[in-house]
């Protein structure tokens, strides 16, 4: 099987969500051109363009024909690509990670040699309200419309459940989440692409309003607008393009498991699970097997932290150890750039806000720069060889990839 590698990665500055200008396609074309220039490639060199779709206007009756759902085709036309395969991926927050995995698979199977993975999203302001379709009513809408249980409600129940299963107080998980926010904000302040530059102390986080106990306001990410572009090629070509190729050791896509207690409201008080949330863990295990490594080989993590609890849970899932180990890691600040397992040195979604369909570009870009030693003040101090990123989306959509230094 052909090996694949990232030869360039570019992201745009994350900004406030909801504004119609500048146009998404213009911003997407600009960040794409930057990625192509870094790789010293031209649009005609691309065999495929794979993009995410957008979260807006998800409740429109014309959703499927909205131009924002065809970014790959519009981008190809905008930058002058002729004849490349154009594919659009829709999987909520996991869209960009799944688009990345698709490009990787096409290259490894020999179907193509060079792919552009790109995308942008302009998230709705505030909570998502699933639009009811006459074709297929959305079951997620019931939790929101009937009992008002938006995302922070079940994130809070999830955090409380973890504390309960560990025999800890709710205050303990609250303090841990506040420390996560403090650490992530320090790196967001150093990232020129992050939307939020304020550095929070844990006490500031705990002093912010309670949204759903134990989640405070500053523990929950905002919605934003942002995106990026990544150029992926077969390894032989990558080594001709750059002297610092980053190998894609593995990329996997997950899905729902029947009966699995992922964050669905009905399970938190009715199920008793020794190893919870295997929907999250399964694509990670597949990636380890594909890459021929274990969690002990991971040097750095970028994870999808829509709340500070998610950082904690992703470390649990990625490392597969007893959850007390995650707590020790965070309390000892070992997730900082000087620590033994840096986590979200980009600043994370906590610092960027969530550009829903495009969030993985932030993570890919950070790992690419970190493995190449190009992250500036955020650069991890340890010798990095292998990194992992993970993302999850609605309805059980998951993406995971393992990147490896190849020089």
Image (cartoon, helix red, strand yellow):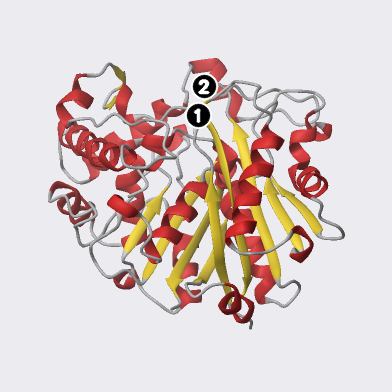
User: Does residue 268 appear in the picture of this structure?
Assistant: no
Residue 187 spot, x, y in % from top left: 30, 43
**Residue drawn at (31%, 42%), measured in percent from left and top?**
190
Q: Which mark is residue 377?
A: none
Q: Is residue 6 above or below residue 230?
A: below
For residue 397, say whether it is visible.
yes
**Depicted 407 relative to depicted 299: above or below:** below
Front residue of 307 and 38: 38
167 with respect to 283 (left or right) = left
Q: Residues within 10 Å of mark 1 (few under 14, many from 20)?
A: many
Helix, strand or loop at label 2? It is: loop
The picture places residue 46, in percent across and down from the top left corner, at: 74, 63
The quarter of the picture where the N terminus appears is: bottom right
Q: Considering depth in this image, is 75 or 54 the residue closer to the camera?
A: 75
**Callout 1: SS:** strand
Q: Residue at x 35, y 37 (%)?
A: 158
Residue at x 49% of width, y 17% of height = 147
Say whether residue 15 is left or right of residue 190: right
- The crowding category of the residue bearing disc 2, from other C-alpha atoms within 10 Å (few below 14, some 14 to 19, many at least 20), is few
Please tell me whether residue 229 is drawn above or below residue 152 in the rendered image: below
Mark number, residue 127: 2
Q: Name the residue at the right extreme.
A: 83
Question: Which residue is label 1 attached to?
Answer: 15
Q: Nearer the viewer, mark 1 or mark 2?
A: 1
Q: Quarter holding the C terminus? A: bottom left
């Amino acid at each position: 099987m052909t090996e694949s590698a990232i030869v360039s990665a570019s992201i745009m500055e994350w900004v406030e969500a909801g504004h119609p200008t500048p146009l998404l396609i213009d911003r997407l074309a600009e960040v794409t051109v930057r990625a192509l220039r870094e790789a010293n490639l031209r649009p005609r060199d691309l065999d495929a363009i794979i993009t995410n779709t957008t979260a807006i206007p998800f409740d429109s009756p014309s959703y499927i024909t909205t131009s924002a759902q065809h970014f790959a085709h519009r981008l190809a036309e905008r930058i002058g690509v002729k004849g490349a395969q154009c594919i659009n991926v829709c999987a909520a927050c996991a869209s960009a990670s799944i688009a990345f995995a698709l490009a990787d698979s096409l290259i490894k199977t020999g179907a193509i040699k060079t792919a552009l993975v790109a995308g942008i999203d302009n998230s709705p302001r505030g909570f998502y309200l699933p639009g009811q379709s006459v074709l297929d009513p959305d079951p997620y809408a019931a939790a929101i419309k009937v009992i008002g249980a938006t995302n922070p409600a079940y994130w809070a129940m999830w955090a409380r459940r973890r504390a309960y299963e560990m025999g800890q107080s709710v205050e303990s998980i609250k303090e841990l989440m506040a420390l996560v926010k403090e650490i992530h904000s320090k790196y967001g302040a150093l990232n020129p692409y992050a939307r939020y530059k304020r550095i929070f102390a844990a006490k500031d986080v705990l002093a912010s309003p309670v949204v759903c106990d134990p989640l405070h306001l500053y523990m929950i990410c905002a919605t934003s607008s942002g995106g990026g572009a990544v150029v992926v090629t077969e390894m032989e070509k990558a080594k001709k393009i750059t002297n610092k190729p980053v190998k894609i050791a593995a990329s996997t896509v997950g899905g729902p498991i029947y009966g699995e207690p992922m964050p669905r409201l009905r399970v938190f008080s009715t199920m008793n699970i020794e190893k919870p949330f295997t929907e999250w863990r399964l694509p990670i295990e597949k990636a380890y097997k594909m890459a021929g490594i274990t969690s002990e080989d991971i040097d750095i993590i970028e994870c999808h932290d829509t709340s500070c609890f998610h950082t904690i849970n992703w470390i649990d899932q990625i490392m597969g150890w007893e959850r007390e180990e995650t707590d020790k890691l965070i309390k000892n600040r070992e997730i900082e750039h000087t620590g033994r397992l840096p986590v979200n040195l980009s600043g994370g979604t906590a610092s960027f806000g969530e550009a829903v369909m495009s969030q993985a570009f932030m993570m890919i870009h950070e790992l690419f720069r970190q493995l190449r030693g190009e992250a500036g003040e955020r650069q991890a101090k340890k010798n990095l060889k292998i990194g992992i990123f993970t993302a999850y989306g609605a309805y059980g959509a998951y993406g995971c990839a393992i990147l490896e230094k190849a020089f």
